């Protein structure tokens, strides 16, 4: 019995470092709401853990908030979609190893009767018509990647952002919530195609809002992974963040992304570099 007890104690002591090391293999990700709302992360992350042994937790916020979390050293890695802001973030020393992973596109959606008559227009012409006719337009207003893109599109159309206009509604919420507000107000909004597909699926393929503007070259929606700079954030798990980035760019993950569909529609197109 004494020998058994001694062996048991020795086994426990030997296993403690392994358990401690396993507890450390946990990665914290900040990402945009679209990757969460669509179900993409619920689909991909179990596969990531299966392949790497790394546990992953994520928080889904707008890209602006995700970048701020990285800046504050609250997370280890980012999956975001605001390229100009991301590049500045890296140039300022907050992130490293930015890598493109996938893309989809933005679309403008609105009521089927299209009260502003913008169906088929370019983005610039559509926004000019919305502003001229003062149709309800619902914005996220949350400094997310989608919001940042929307602001750039108003500027590209030669218009100031109508943030004081009664017909311009700012929700300060995520994409699905913003789409629901637009549906309630019978107005227009801009969304990434993936989240719209999720909204469409939630409505059993019969959504109250339909795509009215799409295909404009200015509507590209690129997603990238950025590791938090370990030189600034001493507790950032750079090795695990690198494993995540490499896995997302791997042939296996890129195929999983390509195969992810709702209502038979592909939501994201892989383009890892």
Image: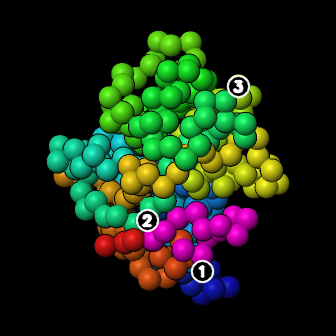
Label 1 SS: helix
Disc on res. 102: 2
Q: Which of marks 1 and 3 is nearer the N terminus?
A: 1
Quadrant of image for the C terminus? bottom left
x and y percent of residue 29 in the render? 46, 54
Report the residue at 53% width, 32% height from top.
140
Label 2 SS: strand
x and y percent of residue 180 in the render? 70, 35
Distance from disc 1 to disc 2, alpha carbons, whole Å, reads 50 Å
Q: What stretch is highlighted in magenta?
A: 258-270
Write down the quadrant of residue 113 in the picture: top right
Residue 239 visible: yes
Q: Earlier in the sequence, mark 1 or mark 2?
A: 1
Residue 260 drawn in magenta? yes
**Residue receiving disc 1:** 8
x and y percent of residue 54 in the render? 49, 69
**Residue receiving disc 3:** 185
Distance from disc 3 to disc 2, alpha carbons, whole Å, reads 32 Å
Q: How many marks?
A: 3
Q: Do the residues labelled 1 and 3 touch (CB within 8 Å)?
A: no
Distance from disc 1 to disc 3, alpha carbons, whole Å, reads 67 Å
């Amino acid at each position: 019995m004494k020998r058994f007890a001694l062996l048991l104690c020795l086994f426990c002591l030997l296993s403690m470092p392994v358990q401690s090391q396993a507890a450390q293999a946990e990665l914290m990700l900040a990402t945009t709401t679209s990757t969460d709302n669509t179900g993409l992360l619920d689909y991909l992350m179990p596969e990531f853990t299966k392949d790497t042994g790394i546990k992953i937790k994520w928080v889904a916020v707008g890209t602006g908030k995700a970048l701020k979390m990285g800046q504050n050293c609250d997370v280890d890695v980012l999956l975001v979609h605001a390229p100009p802001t991301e590049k500045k973030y890296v140039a300022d020393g907050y992130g490293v190893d930015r890598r493109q992973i996938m893309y989809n596109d933005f679309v403008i959606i609105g009521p089927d009767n299209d009260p502003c008559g913008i169906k088929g227009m370019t983005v610039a012409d559509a926004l000019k018509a919305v502003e001229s006719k003062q149709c309800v337009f619902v914005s996220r207003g949350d400094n997310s990647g989608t919001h940042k893109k929307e602001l750039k599109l108003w500027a590209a159309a030669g218009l100031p952002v109508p943030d004081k206009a009664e017909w311009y509604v700012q929700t300060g919420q995520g994409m699905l919530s913003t789409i629901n507000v637009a549906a309630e107000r019978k107005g227009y909004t801009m969304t990434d195609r993936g989240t719209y597909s999720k909204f469409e699926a939630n409505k059993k393929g019969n959504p109250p809002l339909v795509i009215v503007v799409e295909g404009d070259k200015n509507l590209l929606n690129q997603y990238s992974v950025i590791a938090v700079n370990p030189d600034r954030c001493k507790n950032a798990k750079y090795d695990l963040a690198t494993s995540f980035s490499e896995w997302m760019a791997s042939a296996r993950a890129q195929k999983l992304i390509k195969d992810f569909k709702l209502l038979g529609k592909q939501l994201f197109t892989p383009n890892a570099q």
